[in-house]
Image (cartoon, rainbow, N blue to C red):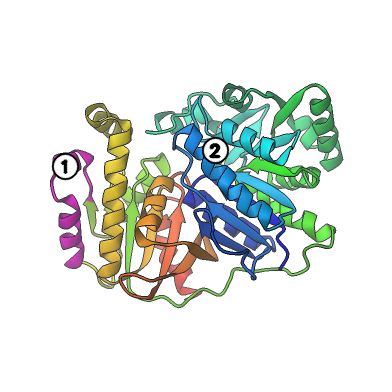
Amino acid sequence: MPALLGCIADDLTGGTDLAGILVNNGMRTVQMIGVPEGPWPEDADAVVVALKSRTSPVHEAVTQSLDALRWLQAAGCVQFYFKYCSTFDSTPRGNIGPVAEALMDALRADFTIACSAFPATRRSIYQGCLFVGGVLLNESGMQHHPLTPMTDANLVRVLQQQTKRKVGLVDHAAVSAGAGAIADQFALLLSNGCRLAIVDAISDRDLKEIAAAAAELLLVTGGSGLAQGLPQNFRQRGLLNAIAAAESMLATGGFKAVIAGSCSTATQNQVDVMRVHHAAFRIDPLELANGDDVVGSALKWAASRVGDEPILIYATAAPDEVRSAQATLGIEKSASLVEHALAAIAQGLVALGVGQLIVAGGETSGAVLHGLGVTRLTIGREIDPGVPWTTTMLERPRRQALALALKSGNFGSPDFFLKAWSKLAMVS
């Protein structure tokens, strides 16, 4: 199978989101966890290499991304895609700008774009400003994010802080005129010394026109929404013939559980709804720091409750609680304690017979998949925009199929945890 699109995602949930979009739009896609060591999968037109680099130090994020790029280049990919969150999660230091620059240098690409818009999840860009749920990014709750607080909605300004290259804007007037006008703006910006450009998008039509205009770019960067138009580019060039659907998923059984680590507003709402209907256990980072056996307590609690009904184990908290824990423990220590605890709990839940697991939060998902030894995911039916069910085959503690839904903290309706199981039943 030819290697067409090589993707690098800066977290696990984002990688799953992207893989689901590509499958839904006709590309056979495999998601690999971490930089692969083997050959390009025979059953793939596209591969998404999912890293855990969104909040890592800049030099680590760049190194991991370049390692992934080298593997994708060796496979002979026609185009490359750097995927980050639709809320442009980053800090003034990076990692979006530095990684994009490093990939451009390695590919000798003189121009690329940045478009994180995803209208299906109410993320849109207008005049370079990102709106989430109809309000500016810095008023959406993302200003309280514990690791990447977003206090500026102007993405041109945000990206310019992270890169030495000049950043321009393709505004909606050009985007609404179609792919030809967008490509003309690319050329104009390049002639004026811009090497990266934020691109406005307020609808799926906009994203498809932007993707068509980007057909000849060696490197494209953005959220998962933009990727919905890329398969058609390959199809028009005669490189992609098959129309793929969600892959046949492994049959999974076992108990149902949710692990929530994200503290986003969306996940807070989902946790609140879940707690009304099902048993829940809260993880407190201060108890972890005190040396309490929180993991043991959580698993003892779970052992007496797993059965026909899903259970919830969560570290999700309101912004003031998060700030209090960070003030006591420090930002990095607080996050690390929770991630390690939730990864250990996931291992314990699988040992208890959980075979259907939802994980909320990109960093949490990365920790959980690492703890479970997952290296490849099969993409299945979409639950909500940007969140499909996936399956994998675990090798430890015993060989078994596991269904996983890896949810970005910001994604999903309030009843996401409740309705996800019915979507899984439709493909199991």
- Magenta extent: 282-304
**322 sits to left or right of 392:** left
From the viewer's perspective, tell me whether residue 20 is left or right of residue 229.
Answer: left
Q: Position of residue 226 (x, y in %)?
A: 67, 46
Q: Is residue 29 visible?
A: yes
Residue 226 shows up from this direction: no
Residue bearing the label numbered 2: 62
- At 41% from the left and 75% from the top, the residue drawn is 252
Which sits earlier in the primary sequence, circle 2 or circle 1? 2
Q: Position of residue 239 (x, y in %)?
A: 80, 62
Q: Which residue is painted at 50% across and 63% down in the image?
A: 376
Q: In which quarter of the image is residue 216?
A: top right
Question: Is 241 part of what is drawn in magenta?
Answer: no
Q: Is residue 341 above or below residue 390?
A: above
Q: Say which element carries label 1.
A: helix
**Residue position for label 1:** 287
Q: Where is residue 333 in the image (x, y as percent from the top left)?
A: 28, 36
> Does 291 appear in magenta?
yes
User: Which residue type carries mark 1?
Assistant: Glu
